[in-house]
């Protein structure tokens, strides 16, 4: 088997992991109804998954840095499978929450290790493409996994989604063992050294952009299913199709973000995308209460998804150019911040649903994105002034990025 096909299979594995994370938002109302809990409590399943993923992944990867990569990937996927099996067989909210913790512990290691293996088995001039392919697998879970999960949940019950993920993950473990070559681990980078980058003001501002941009998105997206059903008035039969359109728009937006960054630069792409993101949430907030037609709502959902994900590749590139000699650490910190922001967004969204109303999530999400726009402006001014931050680590010299 060629390494190209091995990379494609690694992308399929990250698709399974991404589906386990995102699918909750697509079936949140069904989880809430079946377990007899509020939508707010159900939303905390997203919070706990993202929080555990963010905190545990850098720690576990540092502890297992020297472990052979194929073995680590198989064992990490095994932890993920156990979490899905427990989600399928155990009753009750508390046990499901505990199963989500186990799932997240494995999921973070699976994604990072898959990226590491893809980069190492690819040809030197194909490494970036291999990484992009694996990332695309994770992104595809939003496009395909969430609407498929909704269909499965409607036909066979939402727990069957996790039964299918467990079975697919189990098969994938044996295939990985058979087709992935032995790949040695790396010299570990201490967590203290990774966290020391936060002393760099530009890095701190860059990560703050991720937090408010994706946090604002997560406040609304976590509760997208009950929002569309109960506030926007969409029919159950339409929801899978709408979620599919939402996912496709995210892929197109991500592609456009990369194109726009190359053509017009980081800051115009971030500012423009986030301004459109905030505007879409504002218009959606107004439209759902002023129309009984589904067409404008779906159009605004597509616009929201396109704008939100146009910032994804741009923001990753933004952080890499701040510390170009330490791109791996920057991407790792950004991944953790993305998961933390999703946890915070789901938590804040839950509070708003519980204490204000379900319709408030788009308003509050818009505020988070607006704050991100302000932080983008601060970072642009700081980098234009040539400030590299007082906290640059001793012995670490960064290349000065062009500002645009």
Image (spheres, rainbow, N blue to C red):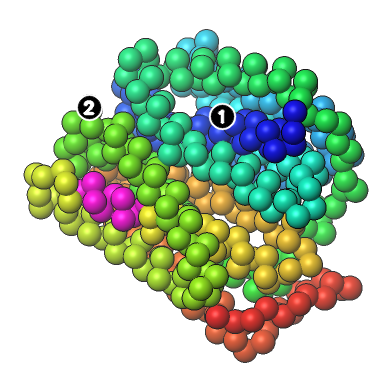
Q: Nearer the viewer, residue 227 or 74?
A: 74
Can the viewer see residue 107 in this picture?
no
Q: Residue at x 56, y 63 (%)?
A: 315
163, above or below 289, in the image: above
Q: Nearer the viewer, residue 132 or 81?
A: 132
Magenta-colored stretch includes residue 127? no
Can the viewer see residue 290 in this picture?
yes
The local crowd at label 2, few if under 14, some if 14 to 19, many if 20 or more residues have their Cα within 10 Å, is: few
Tell me the element at label 1: helix
Q: Position of residue 26 (x, y in %)?
A: 37, 33
- The part of the chain drawn in magenta is 297-305
Q: Nearer the viewer, residue 137 or 222?
A: 137
Residue carrying label 1 = 16
Identify the disc placed on residue 237: 2
Q: Is there a contact, CB below 8 Å, between mark 1 and mark 2?
A: no
C-alpha separation, residue under disc 1 versus residue under disc 2: 24 Å
Identify the disc placed on residue 129: none
Residue 363 figure quarter:
bottom left
267, above or below 87, in the image: below
Main SS type for the magenta part? helix
């Amino acid at each position: 088997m060629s390494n190209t096909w091995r990379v494609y299979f690694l992308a399929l594995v990250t698709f399974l992991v991404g589906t386990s994370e995102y699918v909750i938002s697509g079936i949140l109302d069904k989880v809430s109804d079946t377990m007899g809990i509020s939508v707010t409590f159900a939303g905390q399943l997203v919070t706990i998954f993202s929080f555990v993923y963010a905190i545990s992944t850098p720690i576990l990867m540092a502890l297992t840095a020297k472990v052979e990569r194929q073995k680590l990937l198989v064992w990490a996927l095994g932890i993920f499978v156990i979490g899905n099996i427990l989600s399928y067989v155990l009753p009750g909210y508390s046990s499901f929450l505990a199963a989500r913790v186990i799932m997240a512990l494995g999921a973070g290691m699976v994604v990072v290790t898959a990226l590491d293996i893809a980069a190492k088995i690819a040809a030197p001039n194909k490494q970036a493409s291999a990484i992009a392919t694996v990332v695309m697998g994770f992104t595809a879970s939003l496009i395909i996994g969430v609407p498929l999960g909704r269909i499965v949940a409607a036909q066979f019950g939402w727990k069957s989604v996790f039964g299918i993920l467990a079975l697919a993950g189990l098969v994938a473990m044996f295939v990985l063992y058979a087709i992935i070559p032995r790949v040695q681990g790396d010299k570990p980078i201490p967590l203290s050294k990774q966290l020391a980058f936060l002393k760099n003001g530009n890095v701190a501002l860059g990560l703050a952009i991720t937090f408010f941009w994706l946090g604002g998105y997560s406040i609304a997206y976590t509760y997208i299913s009950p929002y569309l059903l109960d506030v926007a008035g969409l029919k159950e039969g339409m929801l899978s199709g709408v979620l599919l359109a939402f996912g496709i728009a995210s892929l197109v937006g991500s592609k456009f973000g990369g194109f726009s960054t190359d053509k017009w630069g980081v800051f115009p792409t971030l500012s423009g995308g986030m301004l459109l993101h905030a505007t879409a949430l504002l218009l959606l907030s107004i439209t759902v209460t002023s129309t009984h037609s589904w067409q404008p709502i779906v159009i605004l959902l597509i616009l929201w998804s396109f704008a939100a994900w146009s910032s994804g590749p741009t923001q990753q590139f933004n952080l890499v150019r701040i510390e170009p000699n330490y791109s791996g650490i920057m991407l790792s910190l950004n991944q953790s911040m993305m998961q933390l922001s999703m946890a915070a967004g789901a938590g804040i969204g839950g509070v708003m649903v519980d204490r204000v109303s379900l319709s408030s999530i788009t308003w509050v999400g818009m505020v988070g994105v607006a704050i991100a726009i302000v932080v983008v402006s601060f970072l642009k001014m700081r980098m234009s002034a040539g400030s590299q931050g007082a906290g640059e680590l001793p012995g670490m010299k960064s290349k000065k990025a062009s500002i645009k």
